[in-house]
Image (spheres, grey):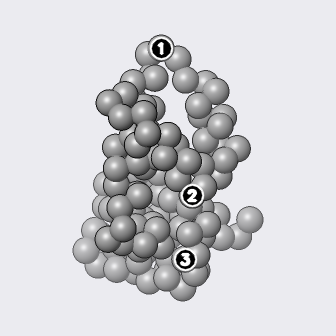
Amino acid sequence: MNNKKVHDEGLKVRREIMNSKRIDNVMEKVTDFDKPFQELVNEYCWGSIWTRPGLSRKIRSLINIAMLTALNRPNEVKMHVEGALNNGCSEEEIREVLLQTVIYCGVPAGLDSLKIAKEVLNR
């Protein structure tokens, strides 16, 4: 961990967006092996990027859904759809992002993420 303050702010943001219980569960299971990875994610991803003022959390969530669809990362899509809802994204906005990904990322990738989003939205 290079910057404890940024790390701690990142962990705070991560808990706010991704559900405190889920993140606490992840952090409780951290071992010596994956501790550096979790510190990196908290500090750089959540602390250095998600706290920047240039984009709202809502916009960042929609961007992440699109990127994770393009990368074919279903577990992350699921978490970020949940996070998008926590950040105030509407079902319509999530659907529109997924429609956009169908065109630019391909139908299979977009449809897979659409299925995941439906599971989250229909809970």
Q: Is residue 66 left or right of residue 104?
A: right
> Does the image show residue 13?
yes
Q: Which residue is mark 1?
A: 32
- Residue 79's disc number: none
Q: Residue furthest top?
A: 32
Q: Earlier in the sequence, mark 3 or mark 1?
A: 1
Location of residue 104 in the rendering, given as x and y in whole percent from the top left corner? 25, 74
> Does the image show residue 108?
no
Location of residue 99 in the rendering, given as x and y in whole percent from the top left corner? 40, 80
- Residue 17's disc number: 2
Q: Which element is circle 1 on?
A: loop
Q: Quadrant of the N terminus?
A: top left
Cα distance between the residues tagged 3 and 2: 12 Å
**Amino acid found under the numbered disc labelled 3:** Cys
Circle 3/circle 2 CB separation < 8 Å? no
Location of residue 79 in the rendering, given as x and y in whole percent from the top left corner? 55, 54
- Residue 89's disc number: 3
Name which residue lies at 61% across and 41% down: 23
Foreground residue among 106 and 21: 21
Foreground residue among 49 and 95: 49
Q: Which element is circle 2 on?
A: helix
